[in-house]
Amino acid sequence: MLDKQSLLRYFRSSNYEDCRVNAYPSFTNFHGINRTPPSFIIIDLDLKDFGYSKYKLDEALNNASKRIKDVLGGYPTVLWTGNGYHIYQPLEGFVLEEIDIFAEFVAPNGKDLTSKFMEFSEDFLTSRRGDPQHNPTVNSCLVRIPGTINSKCKEEVKVIQKWDGHRPPINYLLRDFRRGLINEKVEKQKLSSKEKVEEKGMTRAYLVIQQFRGLRNYYKSL
């Protein structure tokens, strides 16, 4: 893990363009099992997703900020990135994989629950108005540094609102998060059943074709 001075040297060497750091630690799992609690939410509101209307973008920011306050009692950091807003809300969390009612949703080689929680939180707190291409994980939850430059638009990253220092507990979101996990599991089961039915139908059609070919060859041989 780099210290502050090392990071500053890297930032200087890049002319302070596109400087980011991961909000989560470098080591997040043990033998492939997540050991990092959800402790940070990142929300990306991109200008392009609102038809490049600053009015609609600001409206989405206000709605998300209100929802964060109403649901979590949070007051996050808000950055202007040049292309939209980033919202950073620290949380007080615990490892979800260690809780039975959540551990059942851990899939082999699947996404860890902390990353899923971040994905859910962004959708839930923005009413699905966040950047659809934004998919942070515990290994890539990259936050921009105020005062640096976004190379895409050559604008400085600016602080619009500063975090108040309060970390709301993740408990306020867990009921809805679990509902989302259940719905996801049900949809996957439906898709799997549909694929099995389609595969069975294709197999049956293949057998019919083979039987038809066999009969045709038989009559040809008469």
Image (cartoon, helix red, strand yellow):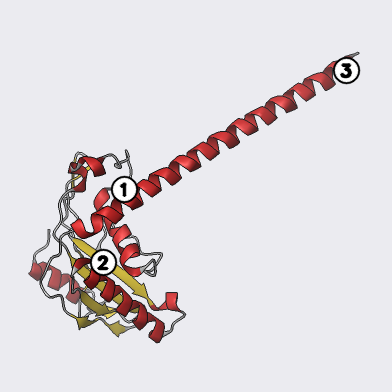
Q: Which mark is residue 111?
A: 1
Q: The residue tagged with tag 1: helix, strand or loop?
A: loop
* Residue sitting nearer the eye, 68 or 147: 68
- Residue density around tag 1, few if under 14, some if 14–19, many if 20 or more, within 10 Å: few
Q: Which residue is mark 2?
A: 42
Q: Which mark is residue 150?
A: none
What amino acid is found at the position of numbered circle 2 in the picture?
Ile
Q: The residue tagged with tag 3: helix, strand or loop?
A: helix
- Residue 88 against residue 2 in the figure, above or below: below
Q: The residue tagged with tag 2: helix, strand or loop?
A: strand
| Residue 90 percent coordinates (x, y) | 17, 65
Q: Inspect this view and state whether residue 2 appears.
A: yes
Q: Which residue is mark 3?
A: 219
Looking at marks 2 and 1 on the same chain, the residue that comes earlier in the sequence is marked by 2
- Asked whether, in this view, residue 140 is left or right of residue 199, the answer is left
C-alpha separation, residue under disc 1 versus residue under disc 3: 57 Å
- Residue 183 against residue 88 in the figure, above or below: above
- Asked whether, in this view, residue 35 is left or right of residue 185, the answer is left
Q: Quadrant of residue 177?
A: bottom left
